[in-house]
Image (tube, grey):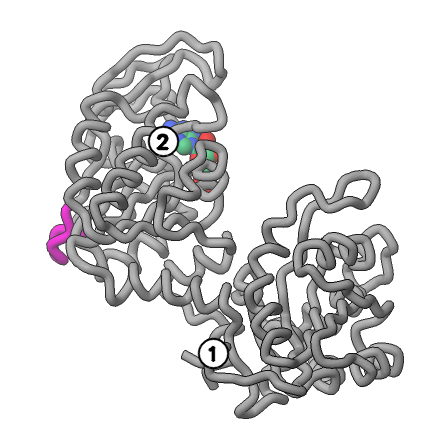
Amino acid sequence: MKVLDDHNFENKKALIRVDFNVPLNEKFEVTDANRIEAAKPTIIKVLEDGGSAILMSHLGRPDGKRNPDLSLKHICAKVSEVIGVSVKFVEDCIGEKAEKAAQELKSGEVLLLENLRYYSEEEKGDEAFAEKLSKLGDVYINDAFGTAHRAHASTTIVAKFFPGAKCFGYLLAKEIDAIEKVMQTGEKPVLAILGGAKVSSKITIIENILDKVDDLIIGGGMTYTFVKAQGGSVGDSICEDDKMDLAMDILKQAKEKGVNVHLPVDVIAADDFSPNAKTKVLDVDNIPNGWQGLDAGPKTLENFKKVILGAKTILWNGPVGVFEMDAFAKGTIAVGNFIDEATRNGAYSLVGGGDSVAAVKQFGFEEKVSYVSTGGGAMLESLEGRTLPGIAAINE
Ligand code: AMP
């Protein structure tokens, strides 16, 4: 892996793709600086070596037009505060003004460029635009995992203009490392816990990880397609009838590959999809009409606990219940607690992709698992086994 530590940035200008797509309030103040914090170690390394940093990012979706509400100047003060250096700002990301600002930058200084997506060429991956960006720095660093699955000008195409002078930032390297640990080098038994609403959105992940895991826990809304496919009654539970053949095929493939599949055996069923619904514990394959399964039941959690505590490498993607409602969050919290315990006993645990990250943050498991991915879509695509263009462009 081409990493930051192999480079010395003394008197070098580092052009760094960061993900500063942060939320702003109505006063244009940054309300969550996590993404800025996440890029800090990379920026500090460049500055401490005696180099200067030119930061480029997108913010929101200006769709190729200048939109003052989405100017990166709004976040300049916050970046200065987090990095501990007064950050300069330039109102463009390419062209004369940007080039002049980059040229004038001295060692130890930081320059923030205007929103890349003011130009439609950015998302199109336009080569001429990427070449203009490349004029700003001597070395290219990609530290934006959240956009690594996009072949945009600043995330992918620009890398070709830096042969021998490009590398991953610390954050992106950590993400790559986490994925490798789970998908390739993880200590056995390797367990994947897949939850969430639908089989259809997770199918490629399931098919890809069947070759990598020893155990697979299936939970959440996906459960009911598997249960109905095997002849169970799921009542009004969420179920994709057109995916039942697929579910049977997954179970067959798992058997052939020697993967132990663990499905819920009981559920917290509700008489309505609502926080105040009446609830009762039912067997997963015997849910009458008028009732729907919204969380994992007690016997299920006992089973999941044994599997989780026996695992040495754990991937968690997707909640095992409707965690947004307190009444149906207990299963997801319990799974988080089991993963916490397994991690304390020496297992490696990665949480990534979409809603599981929200659940982990909401319930305070962030510090308890080994790694929480910062990129929803990029992590999902990695778990599907795809090579991300932003990563390939550095490795080329
Ligand atoms: P995903 O983005 O695919 O990980 O799906 C996450 C969503 O799945 C969350 O919003 C959960 O509320 C939802 N979910 C989990 N379990 C169930 C269930 N049993 N019935 C309906 N939705 C569920």
Which residue carries the number 2 mark?
332
Helix, strand or loop status at disc 1: helix
Image quadrant in which you'd find residue 339? top left
Question: Label 1 crowding class (10 Å Cα cut-off): few <14, some 14-19, many 20+?
Answer: some
Residue type, mark 2 in image: Thr
- In the image, residue 226 above or below residue 122: above
Amino acid type, residue under disc 1 in the picture: Asp
Compare residues 24 and 84 and report the one nearer the observer: 84
Report the image quarter containing ligand 1. Answer: top left
Q: Is residue 388 above or below residue 191?
A: below
Q: Marks 2 and 1, how far apart in space?
A: 38 Å
Q: Is residue 53 left or right of residue 197?
A: right
- Judging by the rendered image, the residue that carries numbered circle 1 is 5
Q: Secondary structure at mark 2?
A: helix
The residue that appears at 38% across and 14% down in the rendered structure is: 270
Quarter placement of the N terminus: bottom left
What's drawn in magenta, residue-wise? 253-260
Asked where in the image residue 110 lies, by quadrant, the reply is: bottom right
Looking at the image, which residue sits at the far bottom? Answer: 163
Q: Is residue 258 magenta?
A: yes
